[in-house]
Amino acid sequence: QVQLVESGGGLVQPGGSLRLSCAASGSIFSIHNMDWYRQAPGKERELVASSSGGGILNYAESVKGRFTISRDNAKNTVYLQMNGLKPEDTAVYYCYVIVQTSERPYQFQYWGQGTLVTVSE
C-alpha cells in the first residue's frame, strides 16, 4: 500500500502564492508520474501539471507561466508552486501518482486526500 499526504493549501489573496506538497510513503519501488489535479465546485476534475518519471513536465494552459511542478525523488515528494493566483484557481487540489511497488512491472494509481486552495479578497 502507498499513502499520500498533501499539505500547503489555504486562503490567499489574488496575486498571492502558495506551495503545495505531496509526500508518498509505503511500498514504493519506483514512482513514475507525479501529477496535480484540481476540482472546482460544480466542475470536473482537471489536470493542472504533470511530472513524468523521465522528467517531462506538462501544464494546463490556464496555469502556464504561473505554476511550477517539481519533485524530490529522494523524498518521494512532489510540489506545486503557485504564483499569481487568481480567484478561478480556487479548487480542491489532488496529487496523483503512478507507483511501481516491486521489481515486477505492475503499476498502481493513488490519489491524495485533497487540499483546499481558496483565492479571495
Image (cartoon, rainbow, N blue to C red):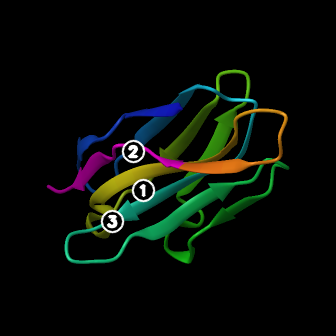
Disc 2, SS: loop
Q: CB of mark 2 within 8 Å of CB of mark 3?
A: no
Asked if the stretch drawn in magenta spans residue 113, the answer is: yes
Pick the front one: 75 or 90: 75
Report the front residue among 31 and 70. Answer: 31
Q: Earlier in the sequence, mark 3 or mark 1?
A: 3
Residue located farthest toward the front when viewing the structure as drawn: 104
Q: Which residues are magenta?
A: 110-121
Pick the front one: 85 or 34: 34
Which numbered tag is attached to residue 39? 3
Please name which of the two marks, 3 or 1, marks the residue nearer to the observer: 3
The amino acid sitting under disc 2 is Ser
Q: Secondary structure at mark 1?
A: loop
Seen at 52% across and 29% down, the residue is 23
Which amino acid type corresponds to the residue marked 3 in the rendered image? Gln
Q: Secondary structure at mark 3?
A: strand
Tell me the crowding category of disc 2: few under 14, some 14 to 19, or many 20 or more residues within 10 angstroms, Cα based: some
The reply to whether discs 2 and 1 touch (Cβ–Cβ < 8 Å) is yes
Q: Which residue is mark 1?
A: 84
Mark 3 near mark 1, Cβ–Cβ under 8 Å?
A: no
Q: CA distance from mark 2 to mark 3?
A: 19 Å
Q: Is residue 23 left or right of residue 10?
A: right
- Give the residue number, with chain letter if any, for mark 2: 17
Mark pair 3, 1: CA separation: 19 Å
Q: Residues within 10 Å of mark 1 (few under 14, many from 20)?
A: some
- Residue at 70 percent across and 35 percent down: it is 101
Q: Where in the figure is residue 71, as x and y percent of width and height?
A: 67, 37
Magenta segment includes 10: no
Which amino acid does the dot numbered 1 rest on? Gly
Residue 78 position by quadrant: top right
Tell me residue 52's x, y (percent).
75, 53
The quadrant in which residue 84 appears is bottom left
